[in-house]
Image (tube, rainbow, N blue to C red):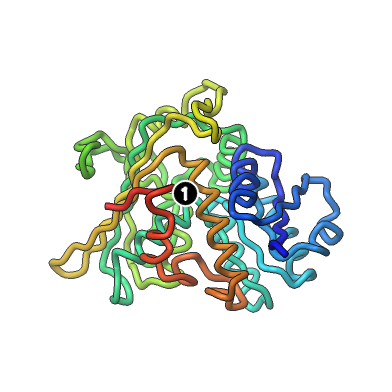
Amino acid sequence: MSERIAVLGAGGHTGGFVVAELRRRGMTPIPCGRATDLDRAFRDADAVINCAGPFATTAAPTIGAAIRAGIPYLDVTAELEVVADTFAAFPGAGIPIVPAVAFYGGLGDLLATAAVGDRPGADHLTIAYALSSWRPTPGTRATGRVSAQRRDGRRVTYTGRRLRHRTGDAPRTEWTFPAPVGTRPVVGEFTTADSAVIPTHLDVPEISTVMTSNAVDDLLAADPSGPVAIDEHGRSAQTFLVEVVARSGGEERRAVASGRDIYAVTAPLVVAAAARILAGEGNAAGVASAGARFDARDFLSALSPGHLTLG
């Protein structure tokens, strides 16, 4: 009998990719709307994947329902405050809880874990994102507004072993990405959920993040149009490259992943994590990230070449 996975927010853009990926892997999705009675919906489910943002509203009640049902909980939030809240609120939960198993959060966490390798951490991590373009979904825009309100217009950075707020304009500089991207203008202090999950299991006092400036400009633009599908899987033409550099002393270690469509690639990330947990891998109770639960290199390799190209 195939595993039954409840998907909160199944009708959304990312939720649709998750439902399709579950079916592709022979699993049975149970689509759940926002007004769903979660206790009833989770009664026959083996796990739940929360794709319904803003997660500041949905994460805690969905985790509560998953705990009552005794099933693993995973989500795809990019809201770093929600990730921090989840780790703080559910440390002794009797189920596996895995927040931010998505492009922002899980992918950077897995790459950082792979780059660090056999070390307990690094003196400094840099996470560099290159997007060819970025047409945010309505969900991304909604969660961005919620996060901005929580931050009172301030930026977030990870320095001195904790998240801190800063005011003023983000720094702009250049970053040389691996070919074929090359040297590009970037915006610094583009802090995402990666900086909330990585320090929960790696000893990293400083995390720097940069995003190509064209993608930041797209994110801030008034254009409300979202991603445009160009293939039979619903993926857009957007391409991405993520490079993680771990520095310790005079040594640098790197891990790189590239692919198509940041929303589409979230689906194989979170579904693979759910499948591994249900198979008994990384299924310890409590809150832990993908990088803490799984062998990072094996996890990433299993997604290549169908979903990721590793460098």
Q: Is residue 189 above or below residue 89?
A: above
Q: In terms of depth relative to the viewer, which is nearer, 306 or 166?
A: 306
The residue positioned 49% from the left and 72% from the top of the image is 293
Q: Is residue 244 above or below residue 177?
A: below
Question: Is disc 1 surrounded by few (<14), some (14 to 19) or many (20+) residues within 10 Å?
Answer: many
Q: In terms of depth relative to the viewer, which is nearer, 257 or 143?
A: 257
The residue positioned 43% from the left and 28% from the top of the image is 218
- Indicate left or right for 83 with 241 as reference: right
Rendered location of residue 282, percent (x, y): 53, 74
Q: Residue 5: which quarter of the image?
A: bottom right
- Indicate left or right for 127 with 6 as reference: left
- Residue bearing the label numbered 1: 103
Q: Is residue 139 above or below residue 114?
A: above
- In the displayed orientation, state which residue is furthest to the left: 250
The residue positioned 72% from the left and 60% from the top of the image is 4
Q: Residue 99: which quarter of the image?
A: bottom right
Rendered location of residue 15, percent (x, y): 64, 44
Q: Amino acid at mark 1?
A: Phe
